[in-house]
Amino acid sequence: MADPVDHYAPELNALEKRARDYLSSAPAGSGKLPLTKADLDRLAAIRNRAVILATISGTISGLIIGGGEIWIRLGFLGGNDDRSLLDDPWLWAAFYAIVGLITVVEIVFLYWNALSAITKIGDVIGLAMKGKPASGLIATGLARSALEIPNPHRKIYGIDPYADLPRWRLLLWNLAYKAKVGVTSFVLRILLRRVFARAILRGYVPLLAVPLYAVWNAWITWAVMREARLRALGPYGVDQIVEKAGERNDEPWRTALLHATGEMVRRSGDSHPTYVLLLARLLEKLDRDRDEIEVNWETARQEARALDGDGRMALADIVACVAVLAGQPAKAQMELLCELDEIAGRPHEGERIAKLRGALIDGQPFSECK
């Protein structure tokens, strides 16, 4: 199988390339799946260490920036907190130049911290990020998660996951990504200044933002570690799904499976790298000549209903596993799962999906794919 990275992110910027190359330079992981209790403990320790380091970096940068502002106001402005920035432009220009430098150093450290932790996750899982089919896709997906870069808004194998998303929501996501802690910190400081009306307290507002920097870094790093672990274990889930899909050779069932999987990806609202890998593997496994899927669930739904009982049940089981590959299924995906369970003649159980998510994130086999 050719590396499907071109269907995910064909054009990388310089930072993404450096992050991908950093991950690709790591030796192949020494672990194996399924994960043991000791493996899970190691993964937790890796995550916790990364979060602690991120918290410390946020605390240090917050103290330097906040303490520097207080030093300027007390040492150069006589404690006058009401002076405008325009009253002392060169002083504040120098200060914010230093703030910018500190911010850059902190961001570089956070990127290194995330990438270093991801290489350790790969070692525990036994993940190869070079020299094997799809290794480029895996390394690229993990690099983008470390850099907190959203998945590219593009079609994957002819499927557009963003087709049903309102443009305002995509714009809001992009703005939220770009705003990050800058807007949050600014708003917090304004609120604090309104709450603490006395000048003596307003002067120390910069230091009150220190916990914000620390908590923000911790939360972002925790989220990065969670997503990186999901992406690192995604290929394991894909292997199980593809193996299960190959157990039946009848064309109606394979066609229904391909369309149901494509519809599940389309409803996800996200071109997740694990979905890219899954579609590439399924197209190869099901002997499809084309590299694009023309999803038509309206037609495929009738074909699914025409399958025998085992076929309908297997279809519902496999697509349920597909739904959790990118994390918590979206509302539209859950609606499709309910429909497939109805076709299979069984009640829909949210607990089943929760167990599948837990199995993937813990590196355990899918019970539905056995």
Image: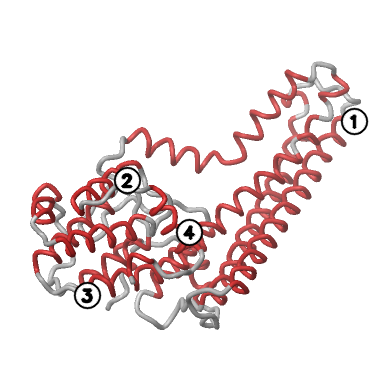
Q: Residue at left 45%, top 63%?
A: 360
- Mark 2, other Cα within 10 Å: few <14 / some 14–19 / many ≥20: many
Alpha carbon distance from label 2 to label 4: 17 Å
Q: Earlier in the sequence, mark 1 or mark 3?
A: 1
Q: Position of residue 208 (x, y in %)?
A: 78, 34
Q: Residue at left 39%, top 66%?
A: 366
Residue 87 drawn above or below residue 105 = above
At mark 2, the secondary structure is helix
Position of the C terminus, as image quadrant, is bottom left
The residue nearer to you, when weighing 163 against 109, is 163
Residue 252 drawn above or below residue 3 = above
* Residue type indicated by callout 1: Leu
Q: Which residue is mark 2?
A: 334
Q: Which residue is mark 1?
A: 74
At mark 1, the secondary structure is helix
Alpha carbon distance from label 1 to label 3: 72 Å
Q: Residue at left 26%, top 40%?
A: 164
Q: How is the image coloured?
A: secondary structure
